[in-house]
Amino acid sequence: MDSVRQLLHDYLLLFAMVNAIGNLPLFADLTSAMNKKEQSGTYKIAVLTGGSIVLGFALFGDVMLRNVFNVSMPAFKIAGGILVFIVAARGVILGSQSSFSPVQNSQSVAVFPMGFPFLAGPGTILTTILLLQSDGHVITVITVFLVYITIFPILKLAPFVERIVGKIGVLVISRILYIFICAKAASFIFDGFHIKL
């Protein structure tokens, strides 16, 4: 019973950190020029990319960071925060469509930025490593599988979001969310420097 409760806790924590629902307007924006088949393929690649990255860190993240690359948690937070901030700031200023051509580069868009950093950002990776340290490999790996299996059908809702709010609404909402992502990225950077705001 305790294991089920812990698994549920970890699932909700990791699912919230991935924030697939909050990113639906962004995904609708990125895939707005694709047909349904291309959108479905893009979502599959994005989930597989994000899930594989997080699963890799669930299995080997702590060892890779500390022993292979000799990277500390603060340094990882700073580097990851900077990367996410650049991607999000570009989205605020230019919009996602100015940086990517969805129809011609659907696989590229699926891998970056949908798979990484949106579905497997530094916050998600750090959370996974922390869960690994506290709860062990078995629960952490099961948690990752459950979260990303849940995410795929959620991403299929992105086109419906676009229909409900319209293309202009998606552009406005996506830019607002990019601002919040910038703020989240800044918090990782400050946390890496141990700066308390």
Image: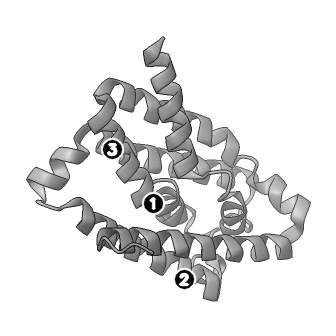
Residue 116: mark in rendering: 1
Q: Earlier in the sequence, mark 3 or mark 2?
A: 2
Distance between mark 1 and mark 3 Cα atoms: 19 Å
Q: Amino acid at mark 1?
A: Phe
- Answer whether labels 3 and 2 touch (C-beta < 8 Å): no
Q: Which residue is mark 2?
A: 89
Callout in the foreground (3, 2): 3
Could you tell whether 20 is left or right of 77 in the image? right
Residue visible at 66% across and 70% down in the picture: 177
From the viewer's perspective, is 48 left or right of 32? Answer: left
**Which sits earlier in the primary sequence, circle 2 or circle 1?**
2
- Residue 77 drawn at (x, y percent): 33, 65
Q: Residues within 10 Å of mark 1 (few under 14, many from 20)?
A: many
Label 2 Cα neighbours within 10 Å, binned few <14 / some 14-19 / many ≥20? some
Residue beneath disc 3: 130
Residue found 51% across the figure and 21% down from its top:
5
Quadrant for the C terminus in the image: bottom left
The amino acid pointed to by label 3 is Leu
Q: Percent x, y for residue 11?
A: 52, 34
| Apparent side of residue 193 relative to residue 69 in the rendered image (left or right) | right
Q: Residue at the location (70% across, 75% down)?
A: 176
Q: Nearer the viewer, mark 1 or mark 3?
A: 3
**Please, is residue 21 above or below residue 122 in the view?**
above
Question: Label 3 to label 2, Cα distance in Å?
Answer: 28 Å
In percent of width and height, residue 164 lies at 90, 59
Label 2 amino acid? Ala
